[in-house]
Amino acid sequence: MSKSLEDSEHLEVSPACHPLAVGNPGDARPSPEQISTVVSILIEAGICCCFVEEYALIYFGASRLPNDRVLCIPDEHHEHAVRLFKSHSDILEPCGPLPLRAPGSLNHKYPRFKAIGRTDFWLLLPASYCHIVCIPENLEWSKGQYLYTWVEGSPCALSIRDVRNGNRKNCSTA
């Protein structure tokens, strides 16, 4: 075996390129319908949920690079949601944590799933960890029929409304 081939076998992969971050070779990007199918597993079981973290920030207009699709689940339904995801082994499989860890994040302690044959990963967080009261009254449906947290009158909601309306000067005071 040549020296360069020997060395290449011991190269470490950047966490950003790890299969637990980007999927496996040949995996396809999910379609909106496929994302809806995963979310509908919970909705059809009567479990309220909403997108949080990067996908919520993107929905509200922030420029972010998305990682996992993170769903906030009411604490009392969290274990049931995990069982439901595990029971759909035809489309989802449990997987390890995202190799890119944010300082102070405890996301690696919660169940994470990978869509089979696709590049989407799903993380299920309890609402208490997200500091969200995950009930229908606090959620907003997007045009794509996904749920996002929205508490009218909260500083976050007021800031977002100001940005959407082009009034950026009030964003720092909300």
Image (tube, grey):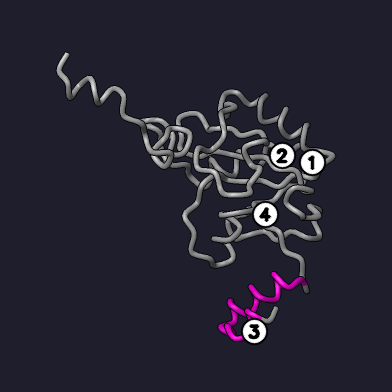
Q: Residue 46, which numbered label?
A: 1
Q: Position of residue 124 (x, y in %)?
A: 67, 40
Q: Is residue 9 shown above or below 153?
A: above
Quadrant hosting residue 6:
top left
Question: Mark 4 sits on what residue?
Answer: 147
The N terminus lies in quadrant:
top left
Badge 1 marks a residue whose secondary structure is loop
- Residue at screen point 61% across, 54% down: 53
Residue contact between numbered discs 1 and 3, judged by CB atoms under 8 Å: no
Query: Is disc 4 surrounded by few (<14), some (14 to 19) or many (20+) residues within 10 Å?
Result: many
- Disc nearer the start of the sequence (2/4): 2
Question: Mark 3 sits on what residue?
Answer: 170
- Disc nearer the start of the sequence (4/1): 1
- Residue at screen point 67% across, 57% down: 148
Question: Mark 2 sits on what residue?
Answer: 42
Tell me the amino acid under the disc marked 2.
Leu
Q: As drawn, is 151 to the left or to the right of 105?
A: right
